Image (spheres, rainbow, N blue to C red):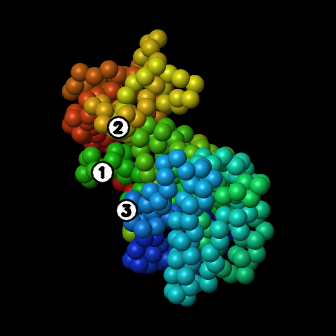
Amino acid sequence: MNIVVVKFGGTSVATEEGRRRAISHIASLRASGKNIIVVVSAMGRKGEPYATDTLISLLDTKSKSDTLDLLMSCGEVISACVFADSLVQHGINAVAMTSAQAGIVTNGVFGGADIFDMDTRIIKTELYEGRVVVVTGFQGVSVRNEVTTLGRGGSDTSAVVIGGFMNAEAVHIFTDVPGIAVIDPRVVPGAKFMEHVDMQHMYAFACWGARVIHPRAIAEAQKYDFDVFVRSTFHAGAGTKLVKNAVMDSGPVGIAIIRECGLFEPEQSDNLIVVRGEEERAVRTSPGGEYSLISVVFSGCGEEDIKNAMGNLQVDAPCYFDELCAHIFVESRQVEVLAENLYHRLFENVALNV
């Protein structure tokens, strides 16, 4: 059916201008013969009336998890209805669906569910009849018909998993940036963007602080055979292509930053571990903390290669190494200076721009 799944984040659907730009991308894909499934996040960010964090603030901090999930799901329902209506007003036949209507079934874990099944018949029927299907991201229903949310970044994950069940040829994650930069452009203005990146390296990049796409979505994407594109709603470029088992040049891939974190004795629940010799430390966020972690992700390099590439640092800070990364635990006040120095030293002569 030439199916393409496109996902639009909260900033893309929050305003009339954002929705108009999003619709132009959909129109372009339809003109090339694609059948489109749209996955939407809640509209806007914290403080705006329909944003997820705003909805959460309506309940007590001790509210029941099933009640909280049901409330949080409302933001995407509103977004799907508004976006589907905008498509119709622009002459594109469209229908809005909740996750239940779309047949998305989760394992029933409130606040952190996984999608394990999907009845694709209804969406396929709508596509066969020529409609664009707009589906709520971030959620599904359990076998008990309970609304469950997928956790932060859940709309990215929804788009990828729906793409898998629908045998899509590609998934496009539209954001407010033109692709994936090798370092946060807010830290290094004018930072270069990648044309493509291997999914395994992007997974490490996302886990260690790059926030353009959620790590869970990348982990799910590696189960399927389609490419994922991270693009800007507000620009016409192709963005950054995430490729399964891509051939990458040896060397640095990107620089990620986790702000305000600390190093702790590892526990079973920790999933971010850094190693130095026999020493292992778990990295956990520590709001208000005085330290941050800068991680440089590498491709095709051994530990000694990574150590040599990093060279001498401008600051006195402990470094941890593994087969993919160099991790620097540094005072937060030194992050910008050190990150900019590393960027210019490692990427100055690398042509990456999208």
What residue is shown with label 2?
287
* Nearest to the observer: residue 295 or residue 148: 148
**Considering depth in this image, is 317 or 197 the residue closer to the camera?**
317
What's the distance in space between the residues labelled 2 and 3, CA to CA? 20 Å
- Element on which disc 3 rests: loop
Identity, as a three-letter code, of the amino acid under mark 2:
Pro
What's the mark number on residue 185?
1
Q: Nearer the viewer, mark 1 or mark 3?
A: 3
Q: Amino acid at mark 3?
A: Gly
In the image, taking residue 213 as reference, residue 336 lies left or right, namely left
Specify which label sits upstream in the sequence, 1 or 3. 3
Q: Amino acid at mark 1?
A: Pro
Within 10 angstroms of label 1, few (less than 14), some, or many (20 or more) residues?
some
Viewer-closest of 145 and 334: 145
Q: Which mark is residue 47?
A: 3
Quadrant location, the N terminus: bottom right
- Mark 3 residue crowding within 10 angstroms, few (<14) / some (14–19) / many (20+): few
In the rendered image, the vertical position of residue 104 relative to residue 263, given as above or below: below
